[in-house]
Image (spheres, rainbow, N blue to C red):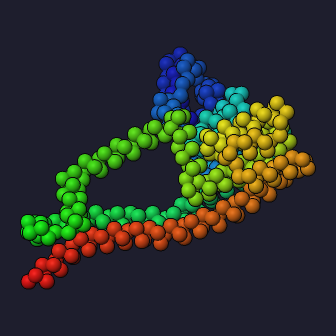
């Protein structure tokens, strides 16, 4: 529900001001008329405008459930506006209830479902909006909503599995960094007087001298270095949010050793699944390609798909431009080519997505298994260097005594 501020006159002609909750401005006017008030001015309250403009973030799992419920209501013959109103009234999540209220109001004012959803990018992804628009135009909105729910759940599960797989290596990296910094900043200075005497005698090992130098730098400029890293992070983040920065980052992702292969295969699997779904729903291939290009999550791959759509318009096949881009695996391109010739593209694309996801999960699992011991070795090696740099001079002093 939206808060509206109003100015009206009552039956005696006296000026009245206040606020009320309504889904749309039209409903607010109707409520005022029901109170025997003649509205002079009705507008969205400022804090409500700000809240709607922020578009609250909603968990993907909750959004997927909403898609499924909306599809079930529509399949049962409930009109769209009433279905959304039912979902809004029974929703326990305040943010989603606010979003659904705004969607309901925009549809009531003449917007399509997809247009109303596009106003809330933090709740409804661009891909979901595109598929819903295609489903509404093609007459398979209920199936489109179910498919979007499935995609949303799969992407949320994928993200959860990746985060879970990288949680332990990330924990190792954080703990190792903290331990190394504690050793360098707090432990090494305790031996400074001993190291100074050995340096005068020319008996201080090079490794120890290096560690002592690093300790002095961290003590003197540690906060400045940390501040510099934080500033660099935010500058890089701002740069990556630009079109050129995102394209550069997406190119780097494709070229990463091992990780790049896994990333590409997951992106191609998403693309094949969405494209197969749209083709199965009867959406023309050119429009399906333009919609599914966003599902890759990569600007470079998306541009390759858009180019393929342009080539198909000119009469070429799908496999040729995808293969020429150099970003799609050759075995996938060959399977798409055979599917085009046999007129089984939509079925083969779904099979490709299933196969790719299974293969890529095995690769990701193996990569994470290898990452853990590698990180342990690197961190243990750094700690060993610091400890040896401290112990060797002490042992020399002991032997001299």
Residue under the point 59% across and 49% down: 254
Task: Give the vertical position of 82 relative to 332 (above or below).
Answer: above
User: Where is residue 92 drawn, in percent x and y?
Assistant: 59, 52
- Quadrant placement of the N terminus: top right
Q: Quadrant of residue 354?
A: bottom right
Task: Give the vertical position of 267 relative to 23 (above or below).
Answer: below
Task: Give the vertical position of 350 relative to 173 (above or below).
Answer: above
Residue under the point 56% across and 39% down: 247
Whether residue 365 is visible:
yes
Total labels: the figure holds 0
Residue under the point 64% across and 36% down: 118
Q: In the image, 181: left or right of 156?
A: left
Task: Give the vertical position of 159 relative to 362 (above or below).
Answer: above
Residue under the point 21% across and 72% down: 390
User: Where is residue 204 drawn, in percent x and y?
Assistant: 16, 69
The front one of 118 and 261 is 261
Q: In the image, 88: left or right of 257?
A: right
The front one of 41 and 357 is 357
User: Where is residue 13 drawn, in percent x and y?
Assistant: 53, 16
Q: In the image, 188: left or right of 351?
A: left
The residue at the far front in this view is: 202
Whether residue 56 is visible:
no
Q: In the image, 187: left or right of 7?
A: left
Q: Quadrant of residue 393?
A: bottom left
- Quadrant placement of the C terminus: bottom left
The front one of 99 and 279 is 279
The residue at the far right in this view is: 342
Q: Quadrant of residue 262?
A: bottom right
User: Where is residue 114 drawn, in percent x and y?
Assistant: 70, 36
């Amino acid at each position: 529900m939206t808060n509206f501020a109003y100015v009206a006159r009552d039956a005696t002609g006296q000026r009245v001001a206040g606020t009320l909750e309504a889904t749309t401005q039209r409903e607010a006017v109707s409520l005022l008329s029901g109170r025997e008030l003649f509205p002079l001015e009705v507008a969205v309250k400022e804090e409500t405008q700000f809240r709607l403009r922020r578009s609250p973030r909603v968990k993907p799992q909750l959004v997927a459930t909403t898609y499924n419920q909306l599809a079930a209501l529509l399949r049962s013959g409930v009109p769209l506006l009433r279905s959304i109103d039912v979902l809004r009234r029974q929703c326990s999540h305040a943010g989603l209830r606010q979003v659904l209220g705004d969607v309901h109001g925009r549809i009531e004012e003449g917007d399509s479902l997809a247009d109303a959803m596009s106003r809330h990018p933090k709740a409804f992804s661009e891909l979901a909006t595109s598929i819903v628009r295609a489903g509404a135009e093609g007459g398979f909105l209920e199936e489109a909503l179910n498919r979007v729910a499935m995609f949303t759940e799969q992407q949320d599960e994928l993200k959860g599995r990746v985060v879970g797989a990288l949680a332990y290596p990330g924990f190792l990296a954080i703990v190792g960094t903290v331990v190394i910094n504690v050793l360098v900043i707090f432990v090494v200075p305790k031996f400074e007087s001993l190291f100074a005497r050995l340096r005068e005698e020319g008996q201080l090992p090079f490794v120890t001298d290096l560690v002592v130098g690093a300790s002095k730098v961290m003590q003197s400029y540690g906060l400045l270095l940390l501040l510099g890293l934080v500033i660099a992070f935010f500058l890089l983040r701002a740069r990556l949010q630009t079109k050129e920065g995102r394209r550069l980052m997406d190119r780097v992702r494709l070229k990463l050793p091992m990780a790049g292969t896994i990333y590409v295969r997951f992106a191609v699997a998403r693309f094949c699944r969405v494209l197969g779904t749209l083709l199965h729903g009867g959406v023309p291939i050119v429009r399906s390609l333009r919609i599914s290009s966003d599902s890759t999550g990569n600007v470079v791959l998306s541009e390759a798909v858009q180019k393929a759509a342009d080539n198909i318009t000119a009469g070429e096949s799908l496999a040729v431009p995808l293969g020429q881009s150099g970003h799609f695996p050759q075995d996938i391109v060959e399977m798409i080519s055979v599917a085009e010739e046999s007129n089984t593209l939509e079925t083969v694309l779904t099979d490709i997505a299933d196969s790719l996801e299974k293969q890529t999960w095995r690769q990701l699992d193996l990569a994470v298994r290898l990452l853990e011991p590698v990180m342990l070795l690197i961190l243990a090696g750094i700690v060993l260097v610091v400890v040896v740099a401290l112990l060797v001079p002490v042992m020399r002093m002991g032997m001299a005594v």
